[in-house]
Amino acid sequence: MNKKTIAICVGHSRSNDDGAENVDGVTEWAFNQPLAKQVCALVAQTAHNAVLVDLYNGPSYGSAMRWLAEHLKEIKADVAVELHFNSAGSLATGYEFLYCGVSPKGLTLASKLSASFAKAFPEQKSRGLKALNKNDRGGTFVMKTHCPAVICEPFFGSNRKDSDFFTAHKEELAKAYAEGILNWLA
């Protein structure tokens, strides 16, 4: 097996951008940063390298994404996932994975992550895979990277039931991420 480098990126990692808040006021960054460490630890138990990326340089989204794309090249990342959670109305529910619409490898990575989530969380609703282009929110991340990249949206923080469930099941969430990534690498 060839040793690969997996970048586990924490969304909203630039200064003054913590992302959305869940129903308890926990920001995306605060929820996902320790979770990303768990995913890295699980991946590190395999023959692969895991790199945590939780501080992006740049004052704007665009400049931070340009910095991140260059950083991923510098660390020779073979794959990158960015951890988030959705926020909308209190009834919104489900998980989805967003990928570059012109990247077959991004699509297969998103598919493996989704399959891992379906296995780990069969009671949760799948919102499917979403192809992004450069004009879509999050499109810059998945399109600027040199490697397959996926934005992970495992639940809606604005939904009390979903937020409570995933807050209580962070270990299983980390395992589902790691399993999806490792299955894609297999």
Image (tube, rainbow, N blue to C red):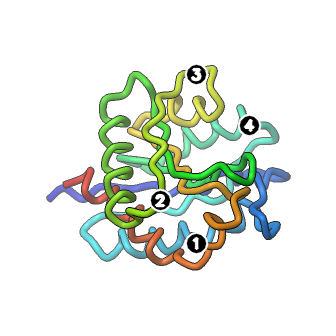
**What residue would you read off at disc 3?**
134
> Distance between the Cα atoms at labels 4 and 2?
30 Å
Question: Would you call the spot at circle 4 few (<14 residues within 10 Å), some (14-19), or many (20 or more)?
Answer: some
Q: Is residue 32 visible?
A: no
Q: Position of residue 22 (x, y in %)?
A: 75, 62
Quarter occupied by the N terminus: bottom left
**What residue would you read off at disc 1?**
165
Element on which disc 2 rests: loop
Evaluate if marks 1 and 2 touch, with contact meaning CB atoms under 8 Å apart. yes
Element on which disc 3 rests: loop
Amino acid at circle 1: Phe
Q: Is residue 154 visible?
A: yes
Element on which disc 1 rests: helix
**What residue would you read off at disc 2?**
124
Amino acid at circle 3: Lys
Amino acid at circle 2: Gln
> Distance between the Cα atoms at labels 3 and 4?
13 Å
At 47% from the left edge and 68% from the top edge, which residue is drawn?
173
